[in-house]
């Protein structure tokens, strides 16, 4: 085990506390929505996009059109394009199969840890890839294991268990340290205000509008800076 890989594992370990209940909550909701155990696990293992999965599941349960479900899930996951672009200077010269594996393992946690570590540590590309893989090692078993546990327990999970704390906590822990410029803060502020103000729109369309407003705000503030 290399130093970079070991460092990645250690940095990713704290996210088990968040990812396990996050996955369990999805497992519970998926089974309540009528998905079988194998469908729930496949959803988590193939898609690996917690926020987008919750969005799609909620819309499917509400009977939203397929186009709205897909559009909303894609909108929630648009940030992955930005994550990928940000990692290209660090991992872009790695072998193709490694880049393909990294794209599969790219989630909020692996990106946030890697982006911060790559800025402060002058590793080679192979070491950066080892670190990235190390961050994924604790995160993914926690997510899929949590999903399996939630799907198995289903309705037996007491409603008093506050599993839904994990989702906002996960994003607060990730987004907070990344708000480093006025454009970031402005975009985050507009997204929160707009999402709350437009929550009355059906099928979570307010989320799409809030995302567009936030991106436009961030771009404008960046242009004026």
Image (spheres, rainbow, N blue to C red):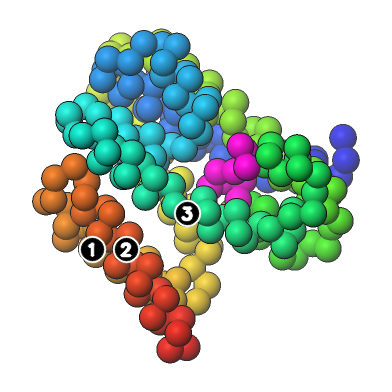
Q: What residue sits 53% from the left and 58% below the top?
A: 82
Mark on residue 33? none
Q: What residue sits 53% from the left and 21% below the top?
A: 145
In the picture of the structure, the residue carrying the numbered disc 1 is 194
Q: What residue sits 42% from the left and 76% below the top?
A: 219
Q: Quadrant of residue 51?
A: top left
Q: Are marks 3 and 2 in contact (CB under 8 Å)?
A: no
Q: How many marks?
A: 3
Q: Return the residue found at the far bottom.
A: 224
Q: Secondary structure at mark 2?
A: helix
User: How far is disc 1 from disc 3 in space, using C-alphas?
Assistant: 18 Å
Magenta highlight range: 103-111
**Residue 125 in sight from this viewpoint:** yes
**Residue 14 in sight from this viewpoint:** no
Mark on residue 79? 3
Whether residue 187 sits left or right of residue 9 in the image: it is left
Asked whether residue 105 is drawn in magenta, I would say: yes
Whether residue 32 sits left or right of residue 10 in the image: it is left
Q: Position of residue 12 (x, y in %)?
A: 65, 41
Q: What residue sits 19% from the left and 34% below the top?
A: 64
Q: Earlier in the sequence, mark 1 or mark 3?
A: 3
Q: Nearer the viewer, mark 2 or mark 1?
A: 2
In the picture of the structure, the residue carrying the numbered disc 2 is 212
Whether residue 93 sits left or right of residue 195 in the image: it is right
């Amino acid at each position: 085990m290399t130093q970079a890989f070991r460092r990645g594992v250690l940095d990713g370990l704290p996210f088990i506390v968040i990812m396990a209940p996050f996955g369990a909550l999805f497992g519970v909701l998926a089974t309540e929505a009528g998905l079988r155990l194998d469908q729930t696990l496949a959803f988590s293992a193939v898609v690996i996009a917690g926020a987008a999965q919750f969005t799609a599941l909620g819309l499917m349960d509400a009977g939203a059109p397929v186009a709205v479900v897909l559009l909303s899930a894609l909108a929630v996951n648009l940030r992955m394009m930005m994550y990928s672009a940000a990692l290209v200077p660090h991992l872009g010269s790695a072998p193709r199969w490694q880049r393909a594996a990294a794209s599969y393992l790219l989630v909020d946690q692996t990106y946030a840890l890697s982006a911060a570590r790559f800025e402060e540590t002058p590793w080679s590309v192979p070491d950066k890839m080892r670190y990235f893989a190390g961050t994924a090692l604790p995160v993914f078993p926690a997510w899929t294991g949590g999903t399996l546990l939630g799907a198995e327990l289903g309705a037996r999970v007491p409603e008093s268990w506050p599993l839904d704390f994990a989702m906002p906590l996960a994003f607060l822990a990730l987004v907070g340290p990344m708000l480093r410029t006025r454009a970031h803060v402005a975009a985050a502020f507009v997204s929160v205000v707009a999402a709350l103000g437009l929550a009355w729109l059906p099928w979570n369309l307010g989320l799409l509008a809030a995302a567009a407003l936030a991106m436009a705000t961030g771009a404008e503030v960046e242009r004026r800076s």
